[in-house]
Every structure is written in C-alpha cells, then in structure tokens.
Image (tube, rainbow, N blue to C red):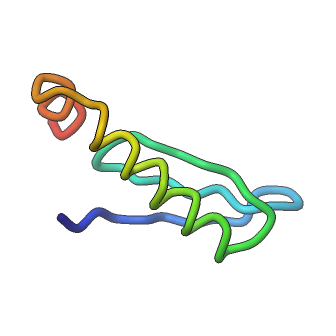
Amino acid sequence: MNFTAVIEREGDGYMSLCPELDIASQCDNVAEARENLREAIELFLECADAAEMQRRQQ
C-alpha cells in the first residue's frame, strides 16, 4: 500500500500528515517526521478493523 506523506515546517519542528488516513506526527527534523509517520501508519494498519479503514479512506 502507498500513502501520501505531507511534511511541513511548523515552528521549530516538522509536522507530517497522511491525509488518506488522517494520521499526523510531529518531530524535530524531516527524517524523523517521515519515520514517525511511517510507524504511526503501520501501527494503525495493525490495529484498525475493516470498518475503521473504510471510514478513514472516504
């Protein structure tokens, strides 16, 4: 599966967002923002049931 990662500078750090799943993370640099978002998406995919996946992808 491929998802979009939007990473933007926010104050002294970076905010990363996966708009398809409405998952976000904040970190000190771009590399950490990307990695933390990847981990958050993996955890979501491991834990979410089919109904939650469908709801978030609408």
Position of the N terminus by quadrant: bottom left
Where 18 sits versus 43, above or below? below
Q: Residue extending furthest bottom? A: 31
Image coordinates of residue 9 in percent, x first then y, are 72, 65
Q: Give the residue drawn at x 47%, y 48%.
A: 40
Q: Give the residue drawn at x 31%, y 32%.
A: 47
Where 46 sits versus 49, above or below? below
Find residue 3 and report its image quarter.
bottom left
Q: Residue extending furthest top? A: 51
Q: Residue extending furthest right? A: 12
Q: Give the residue drawn at x 48%, y 64%.
A: 6
Position of residue 49 in the picture relative to residue 45 (left or right)? left
Total numbered labels placed on residues in the image: 0
Find residue 10 and report its image quarter.
bottom right
Foreground residue among 23 and 48: 48
Image coordinates of residue 22 in percent, x first then y, are 39, 40
Image coordinates of residue 15 in percent, x first then y, are 65, 56
Where 6 sits versus 26, above or below? below
Foreground residue among 26 and 58: 26
Position of residue 45 in the picture relative to residue 33 (left or right)? left
Image coordinates of residue 35 in percent, x first then y, are 56, 67
Q: Give the residue drawn at x 15%, y 36%.
A: 58
Position of residue 39 in the picture relative to residue 11 (left or right)? left
